[in-house]
């Protein structure tokens, strides 16, 4: 596998993916929906252009979590695999923790920081957005809460 190709998969190995090229973005999301979908205090997303993503083994199951939003998971072990939304055409968001080498990607910001759990205080210097971090938006703050 070349340096510009990353791979990953679910806990049991039934579903595997790989992608080429740099991610569009990598970020930490604190929204309630992501927390519930992962049973964790936050999740870290890696946005990949669909043209660069291949499901290399198995096919994940699909759950429509809200109108226009699909979350996929392994039908064998239940591992969450991806998020796709009509608002982001042509891209798939993968969980950084599902990568074989999660340290190969670096988050650039926090989103939905206003929804974070009170006991979750990360001590990094990344920008924090209380909602989304769309084009032209200014962070609500930078650094730890």
Image (tube, rainbow, N blue to C red):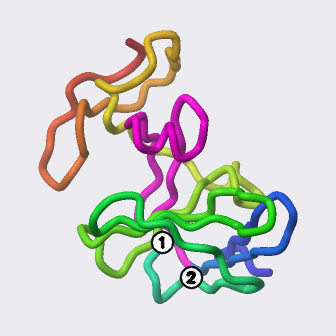
Q: Which residue is mark 2?
A: 53
* Residue 53 image point, x, y percent: 56, 82
Q: Can residue 120 be found in the magenta stretch?
A: no
Q: Circle 1 — which element?
A: strand
Count how many numbered circles sit on residues in the image.
Answer: 2
* Residue 30 image point, x, y percent: 42, 34
Marks 2 and 1 in Cβ contact (< 8 Å)? yes
Q: Quadrant of the C terminus?
A: top left
* Residue 40 image point, x, y percent: 60, 34
Give the magenta-colored segment's residue range.
21-47
User: Viewed as shown, does residue 63 lie left or right of 78?
Assistant: left
Q: Nearer the viewer, residue 131 or 134?
A: 131
Q: Circle 2 — which element?
A: strand
User: Viewed as shown, does residue 114 lie left or right of 118?
Assistant: left
Q: To which quarter of the image does residue 66 belong?
A: bottom left
- Furthest residue toward right: 12
Q: Earlier in the sequence, mark 2 or mark 1?
A: 1
Q: Nearer the viewer, residue 14 or 45?
A: 14
* Residue 75 image point, x, y percent: 72, 69
């Amino acid at each position: 596998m070349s340096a510009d190709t990353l791979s990953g998969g679910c806990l049991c190995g039934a579903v595997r993916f790989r992608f080429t090229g740099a991610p569009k973005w990598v970020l930490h999301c604190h929204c309630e929906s992501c927390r519930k979908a992962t049973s964790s205090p936050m999740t870290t997303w890696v946005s990949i252009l669909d043209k660069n993503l291949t499901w290399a083994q198995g096919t994940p199951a699909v759950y429509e979590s809200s109108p226009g939003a699909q979350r996929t998971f392994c039908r064998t072990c239940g591992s969450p695999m991806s998020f796709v939304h009509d608002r982001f055409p042509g891209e798939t968001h993968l969980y950084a923790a599902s990568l074989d080498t999660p340290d190969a990607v670096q988050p650039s910001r926090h989103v939905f920081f206003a929804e974070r759990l009170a006991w979750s205080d990360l001590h990094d210097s990344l920008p924090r957005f209380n909602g989304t971090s769309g084009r032209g938006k200014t962070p609500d703050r930078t650094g730890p809460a």
